[in-house]
Image (cartoon, rainbow, N blue to C red):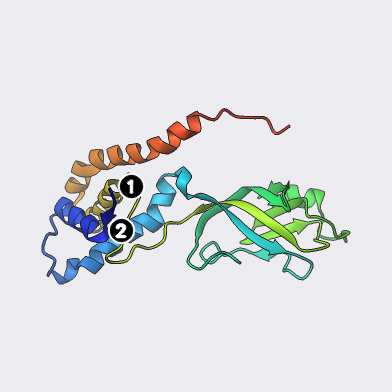
Amino acid sequence: MAKSTADLINIVRNVTGRVDASDPMFTDQIMLGYINDFYMLEMGQEIRINERMTWWEFDFGPTSSNPFPVDLQNPAQAPAGVQFTTIGPLIYVDGFQSWWYQDPEQFFWQWPETQTYTPQRPQYVLYYNQSLLFRGPPDKVYRIKISAYQVEQEMIGGQNINQDYLWRYVCYGAARDIFADYGELDQWANYEPAFRRYKALVYARTYQQNMNQRSLPRF
C-alpha cells in the first residue's frame, strides 16, 4: 500500500519522539528534509536495488566535446531532474559494446595522447576526472548507452511513495540520522536492529532476483 509523505513524517516522529509538529526545530518540512536526505543521498550508497538500475543515453558525434564532460547531478541529454550516483562499466555505441576504462595508465598505454587517430566508431572509453574520453574519435553521430544507477527524486509534501517495501527502511534511516545529529547514541543503538531488519527486507528483493541469474562468459 502506498504511503504519503505525511505518513512517513508521522512514523519518523513516533520513532524519534519528535511528536510536536509546532516545534520550530522539527516542523513537517524539517522532518521531510531528513527523509529526503536519506532517500536521495544515503540510500543509494547503502543498497543497490534493481529498480534504480537504468541507462544513460545521449548522442555523441564529431562536434561533441571529447573528453565529454560528466555531471552526475545533471547528466547531459537526460530528462530534467534525473541524477546518477555511478555510471558504467557497461557501454554501447550504436548497439555495439565498447571497452570501459577507469585507469588512465592502461588506457593511454594503448591510446597515447600524442597520436592522431582516424575517425571511426568509438570502441574504447576512459571515465576519469569527471569526463569520458572516446577512442577513436567519432566519424558521425552515435547513440551512447551507459549503465547507470539513478538517484531517487525528491519527495514533496502530499506526495505518495509507491514503493511500499521501502517506506519503513527510509523512515528508520531518517530517524537514525536525527539521533546521530542530536547525540542520542543510546536511541540510535536501540533502533539499529530494526533499521537493519528493514534494510535486509528491502535488499532481499534484489538479492533473490540476482540469485536467479547465473554468470555468463563474455564470449
Q: CA distance from mark 2 to mark 1?
A: 12 Å
First of labels 2, 1 by sequence position: 2
Q: On residue 160, which mark appears?
A: 2
Indicate the quadrant where residue 133 lies.
Answer: bottom right
Q: Are marks 2 and 1 in contact (CB under 8 Å)?
A: no
Q: Is residue 157 left or right of residue 79?
A: left
Indicate the quadrant where residue 192 lies.
Answer: top left
Q: At 17% from the left edge and 53% from the top edge, which residue is drawn?
A: 16
Q: Residue furthest front?
A: 1
219 versus 1 height, above or below = above
Q: Does the image show residue 103? A: no
Q: Position of residue 141 (x, y in %)?
A: 76, 63
Q: On residue 51, which mark appears?
A: none
Q: At 54% from the left edge and 30% from the top edge, which residue is drawn?
A: 213
Helix, strand or loop status at disc 2: strand
Q: Position of residue 132 (x, y in %)?
A: 68, 59
Check disc 2 and give the amino acid type: Asn
Q: Does the image show residue 139? A: yes
Q: Position of residue 1 (x, y in %)?
A: 27, 48
Check disc 1 and give the amino acid type: Leu
Helix, strand or loop status at disc 1: loop
Crowdedness near tag 2: few (<14), some (14–19) or many (≥20) residues, C-alpha within 10 Å:
some
Q: Position of residue 108 (x, y in %)?
A: 77, 52
Q: In the rendered image, which residue does mark 1 sit on?
A: 166
